[in-house]
Image: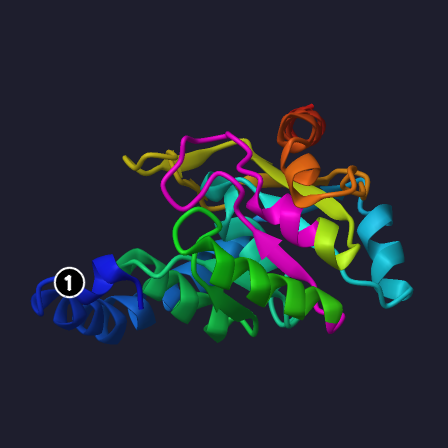
Amino acid sequence: MSNAAAGAPQAAPNAVDWRVKILLPIGLVFVALLTRSWRVRERNADGWRRLRAEKKPWVFAIWHSCLLVPAFIHRNEDIAVLVSQHRDGELIARVLAAWGNRTVRGSTTRGGSRALLAMIKELERGTVVAVTPDGPRGPALKFQPGALVAAHRAGAPVVPLTVHADRAWRLKSWDSFMIPKFFARVTVAYGTPAMVGGTSSREAAAEAERFEALMHEAQALADG
């Protein structure tokens, strides 16, 4: 547990328990109905499918605002998703578990060394890892380098994953979290798997601008 979590008022865990026990089951039923109505299409999925056929690990890079769609689309694939330790992260972790995926708790920016080591171990075991490079608190659409350092150390490629919905709700959160509406046409676009360059963690981190550009290219493919 982080120092911030350890010093939080005791009411916070009770708030988590209340939300998990009451809101989560209701939310899962709602989302199950919602997702079944979506009309989903994929673009440029050959790259990560080839990696899967070759039984090689990779890192999915997903903007925080788009997390709901890939979490559902890739359910029951035993993907290890990096999720922060704050209260909302606990709810996300429970949803991911209900959908058959696992979580790595922590942040690449706060208490980052523990999260990075956990991600590297998962990749070295051959597990696919998913990261929101602009999470957990932004700035939105800004690629933070933690995922690149982990991928570089494990020798795994990074696959951008972006989403477009022709109609969606947007939460009033820092990332304008997206929830496609009922019967929305949802496009999931993947970037071509890309290795992180450099010979050190510092050089790998310096690749953040390049991978941010690759994310935007994938988004343009989803939007098109």
Q: Nearer the viewer, residue 121 or 134?
A: 121
Name the quarter where the C terminus is drawn. top right
Total tally of numbered discs in the picture? 1
Stretch of the chain drawn in magenta: 125-151
Task: Determine the secondary structure under disc 1.
Answer: loop
x then y, percent, for residue 204: 69, 39
x then y, percent, for residue 71: 55, 57
13 left or right of 57 in image: left
Q: Nearer the viewer, residue 36 or 100?
A: 100
Q: Which residue is depicted at the point 47% across and 43% down?
A: 64
User: Mark 1 highlights which residue?
Assistant: 7
Q: Nearer the viewer, residue 162 or 152?
A: 152
87 left or right of 222 in image: left
Q: Amino acid at mark 1?
A: Gly
Q: Which residue is depicted at the point 64% across and 38% down?
A: 202
x then y, percent, for residue 30: 37, 61
Name the quarter where the N terminus is drawn. bottom left
Q: Which residue is depicted at the point 40% across and 35% down?
A: 138
Q: Nearer the viewer, residue 29 or 149?
A: 149
